[in-house]
Amino acid sequence: MFRTLSIAAACAALVLPAAALAHHGWSSYDSSKVIKHTAPLTDVVWGNPHGSAKVSYQGRTWDVVLAPVLRMQNRGLTREMLAPGKRVTLEGYPRSDGAAEMRIERITVDGKTVELR
């Protein structure tokens, strides 16, 4: 029994840190550099832990980090409003390390602005 628990503990010690690293924290974004950009979305993912998309910005393809699906739905943002090709205005912050990724605070689509945080 003790051996089984030790193996389980060892596996958890290996898996949990990897899972924590896989999801980025908000401290990795530079809130002093606000991005406001209007463009069509591509590669939209309506899922958890948060929605995501891609957008062309400054000559590169950027990853767009949205809010969790339930939060977006509760605030009136639907999957149809974020369909691929849909033109939106994104307001948020870039990653501090220069990676082409932005965390979105608010999104405007079809004349409606939705706060995501």
Image: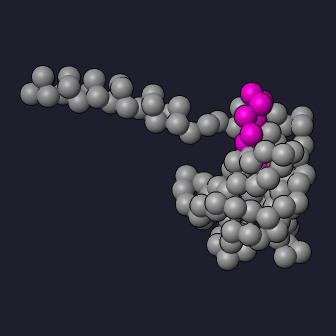
In the rendered image, residue 40 lying in the magenta stretch gets the answer no
Is residue 17 rendered to the left or right of residue 97?
left
Tell me which residue sits at (74%, 62%) in the image.
41
Tell me which residue sits at (14%, 28%) in the image.
4
Q: Is residue 77 visible?
A: no
Q: Which residue ends up furthest to the front in the rendered image?
A: 59
**Residue 40 to residue 95: above or below:** below
Q: Name the colour scheme.
A: one colour
Q: Give the image location of residue 59, x and y in percent.
A: 84, 46
Tell me which residue sits at (50%, 33%) in the image.
20
Tell me which residue sits at (87%, 45%) in the image.
58
Q: Which residues are magenta?
A: 95-104
Q: Give the image location of residue 117, x and y in percent.
A: 74, 53
Question: Splitting the image into 4 quarters, where does residue 60 fall?
Answer: top right
**Residue 61 to residue 30: above or below:** below
Is residue 22 rendered to the left or right of residue 63?
left
**Residue 7 to residue 53: above or below:** above
Q: Is residue 44 visible?
A: yes
Question: Splitting the image into 4 quarters, where does residue 114 fall?
Answer: bottom right
Count all numbered tags in the image, as a single digit: 0
Q: Give the image location of residue 104, x and y in percent.
A: 77, 51
